[in-house]
Image (cartoon, rainbow, N blue to C red):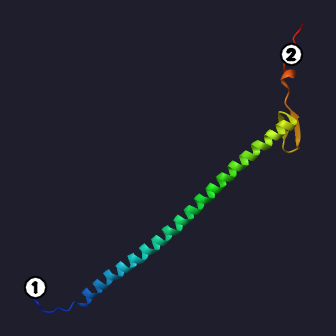
Amino acid sequence: MADNKEVKFTDEEMQQLADVQTSYQNIQMRMGNLKMQQVSYEKQGEALNDLEDTLLTELETLQGNEQTLAQSFNEKYGVGQLDPATGVFTPAPSAEAETPAEDA
């Protein structure tokens, strides 16, 4: 069928070509939607990473503040236990009180 005369495609063949074109367009649209979702998820991931960094920085600051506060309480009240529910501080037994007196 290598004649040089024009041949008209059948309606069925034209429909097959149209179906292929439609399938290409459908895939292109779906690929575009996929990319849009990926971009959205990447931005959400970046935002979550930024939030994590912020929270870790806040945690480090809080831990530093806690250490400073504990140190100031130790300087003011000495070593002991604080009951956070009641606010009552019980000093730890001193080393001198724990050591029995030696007989002379």
The residue that mark 2 highlights is 100
Q: Position of residue 48 (x, y in %)?
A: 59, 60
18 relative to 10 in the view: left or right: right
> Could you tell me the amino acid type at mark 2?
Pro
Q: Nearer the viewer, mark 2 or mark 1?
A: 2
Looking at the rendering, in which quadrant would you find the C terminus? Answer: top right
Please name whichever residue, 87 or 46, is drawn nearer the observer in this view of the structure.
46
Q: Which residue is mark 1?
A: 2
Task: Give the residue drawn at x 72%, y 46%.
Answer: 63
The span from disc 2 to disc 1 (Cα, nearest Å) is 117 Å
Q: Is residue 40 above or below residue 84?
A: below
Left of 65 or right of it: where is 26? left
The quarter holding residue 74 reads top right
Q: Earlier in the sequence, mark 2 or mark 1?
A: 1
User: Which of the 4 image quarters holds residue 100?
Assistant: top right
Q: Nearer the viewer, residue 4 or 56?
A: 56
Find residue 75 and report its horizontal and vertical position in percent. 84, 36
Left or right of 60 in this view: 27: left
Q: Amino acid at mark 1?
A: Ala
Q: Is residue 67 above or below residue 92?
A: below
Q: Residue at 85% across / 41% down in the picture?
A: 83
Element type at marker 1? loop
Which is more toward the observer, 41 or 76? 76
Task: Give the crowd class for mark 2: few <14, some 14-19, many >=20 residues within 10 Å.
Answer: few
Label 1 packing within 10 angstroms: few (<14), some (14-19), many (20+): few
Q: Residue at position x 50%, y 70% from top?
A: 37
